[in-house]
Amino acid sequence: AQTVTQSQPEMSVQEAETVTLSCTYDTSESNYYLFWYKQPPSRQMILVIRQEAYKQQNATENRFSVNFQKAAKSFSLKISDSQLGDTAMYFCAFMTRDDKIIFGKGTRLHILP
Amino acid sequence: DSGVTQTPKHLITATGQRVTLRCSPRSGDLSVYWYQQSLDQGLQFLIQYYNGEERAKGNILERFSAQQFPDLHSELNLSSLELGDSALYFCASSVARRLSSTDTQYFGPGTRLTVL
């Protein structure tokens, strides 16, 4: 079965620090998409970043970057210069070949002033 | 504001009842996705429609059904409701049949369903 695991249920960091959220997944597919979504207290789901498995270069979006290790099936999210507005639940997600999207349980991130 | 609208925002009903949740995608988006977010199951993909046709199916119960109409809005029907169906139901939309490096999935604000 294809699964997504986020091993950190909750994390706290000081504002302006760098934080890394972990995600591992299990699949036998060779090409797929990986995503990080953010869900702030408003409950709105927002796409943070995406990665195509066949691309070796790690995706970046401003202060957000990923460390994609295909062989290890690892897809961590790094947030640099963290801001109070980054406080949210973060979900790692994987899209299967038949277009089903599987989410991890989420990591609740608190940015402390 | 993502441009995806969902109605109603909140819904309270009793066990055994049937409800319909409605979603209007962003202008120009042909794909609609439905998700369920509950405390015990987390965020689960239910079903996707593309231009009126069912495209992908996730963990959707037989008591649940969905459709996408010619004007591209979608409805999720939940019947014989149980306490465990209480959850936040999200709709999302995107342009293409399949998410890609250039296509983004935009989420609506969700409908909170409470089954008493």
Image (cartoon, coloured by chain):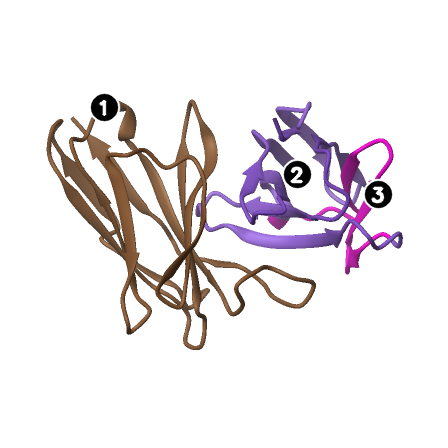
Other-residue count near label 2 (Cα within 10 Å), few / some / many at <14 / 14–19 / ≥20: some
- The dot on residue A67 is 3
In the image, what residue type sits under mark 3? Asn
User: Residue at 78% of width from left, 49% of height from top?
Assistant: A53
- Chain B's colour? brown
Expressed as whole percent of the image width and height from the top left, the position of residue A66 reads 80, 46
Could you say which quadrant of the image residue A24 lies in?
Answer: top right
Examine the structure image and report whether residue B84 is included in the region drawn in magenta. Answer: no
- The dot on residue B83 is 1
Describe the element under mark 3 as helix, strand or loop.
Answer: strand
- For disc 2, the marked residue is A111
In the rendered image of this protein, does residue B24 appear above or below residue B38? Answer: below
Q: In the image, which residues are magenta?
A: A58-85
| B60 on left or right of B86 | right
Expressed as whole percent of the image width and height from the top left, the position of residue A59 reads 80, 55
Chain letter of mark 1 equals B
Distance of mark 1 from mark 3, alpha carbons?
40 Å
Chain identifier, purple in the render: A
